[in-house]
Amino acid sequence: MSAVVSKKRKRNEEPAEISLELSSQDTAQIGAVLASFPAIHPTKSVPYKAYLNKKEPNKPFSEQDVTIVGETDSVEFVTGPETQVAAAGCRCTQQADEYDCIPSSSVAHPDKKCEEAKESGVHGCKLGCRLAQRNKLGETFGTKKAKTAIRAQERNRIDVDAMRGAAGHIQDRIEENTTSLPTREEAKAAADENRLIPPHNLDAERPDDVYALHDVIPEAEWKALTVSALKHASSDKERRYMLPYSRSEWINQHLLLAFAAPSVKTNTLKILFYVSAMMAFKQAARAGDKKKLQERLKSVPSIVVDGLVSRFMETPRESNEPKITSQTETSLLTHMFVLCLRVDDFASDSALIAKDLSMPPASVNALFKSLGCKIGTKRAILRTPVVFPTVKFKRARR
């Protein structure tokens, strides 16, 4: 029989010898470096140089920030601490002249850069280049709507180079036209004067001096108001039906409080009666019929009715009948709320008043704010010095 030759690899009886020797090089000097190339594999002929941080010359090489640079005719390889963060997760190592072949510090993988981009100083395409490329793609492959939008954008684009010569003239024209514009203080004063509120005193030190009583109720109308019938009424129900508007819970509550006091204040009764007349006027004026308005306010002196009509109604051009408008109605409500504040010692229940007028509480609170009030918990409070809300302008939609 022939001898069977075994194909198994036999262990070498004489093991290979490896000798290690300590390096005499200073640990702060540049040593051997091991790096990996996850994206591209350069040729072995590419020369590399390692650069250390000059701020830390005495620090061991394995602990320093090392920058490795390799350059060819078309590609440049650069590593550094800034690329380590961008390439988080890559397995790159650095070897120094120590026994530990893979120390704890690491070097990020080389980042390639095109030489053309490096020489021109352009890292990637500029914004204008990207827009031009996007528009070109849209013109070629875009929908009809997209193509229309691209053409409109091209028509609306401003040529900056063409406008350089006219920039000085435009700036001069702007300065000429803006000289006549009011200042911020003048604009604020004009806005305060044009508010749909009674005449006011911004320098008042007490709330009752902000709005004078006879600026809301003219003196002639004030003298014409009589409340003797209310004083001689036998019951609260009878007094309620003597009012021009008897369904106001706010007025009825204050009427009860007025007669529950040790002495009845005539001025308070007059203001309550006038507020009731204003509520009845607001409800009846919507019809636009003056005769029906007078019938509805038959318990109110005629001078008061004529005053309400003249101040809070307007006669349109195509008609002879006066009508209440949105602006005059706002003015009527603000005059009414000033009287409510005076009766409530300048802290009115805005929710109760909104319920009597069948209005949203937010709308009533906005009118109280226009008078300079601060809205608290169910209360509109007037304090001095009075501060009016600033007018907010909305940007026009394009």
Image: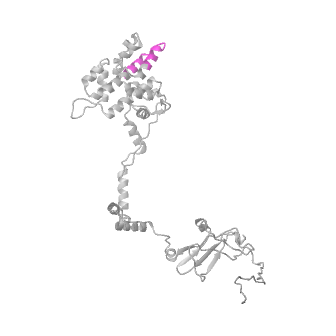
Say if residue 231 shows up in the picture.
yes
Image position of 92 (left or right of 125): right
Give the side of residue 17 with respect to residue 74, left or right.
right
Query: Does residue 97 appear to the left or right of 200 in the view shown?
Result: right
Give the number of marks.
0
Of residues 292 and 358, which is closer to you in this image? 358
Horizontal and vertical percent position of residue 128: 42, 66
Q: What colour scheme governs how the chains and residues are painted in the rendered image of this protein?
A: one colour
Residue at the farthest bottom position: 2
The picture places residue 13, in percent across and down from the top left corner, at 78, 83
The quarter of the picture where the N terminus appears is bottom right
271 magenta-colored: yes
Q: For residue 210: magenta?
A: no
- In the depicted structure, whether residue 262 falls above or below residue 360: above
Where does the magenta region start and end?
253-274
Residue 57 shows in this picture = no
Residue at 59% in and 68% down: 83
Q: Residue at x 32, y 25 (%)?
A: 281
Which residue is found at the position 35% from the left and 60% from the top? 169
Determine the image quadrant of residue 88. bottom right
As drawn, 356 above or below 103: above
Residue 277 in the image, given as x and y percentages of width and height: 35, 22
Q: In which quarter of the image is residue 75?
A: bottom right
Q: Residue at left 39%, top 26%?
A: 356
Q: Left or right of 123: which side holds 318?
A: left
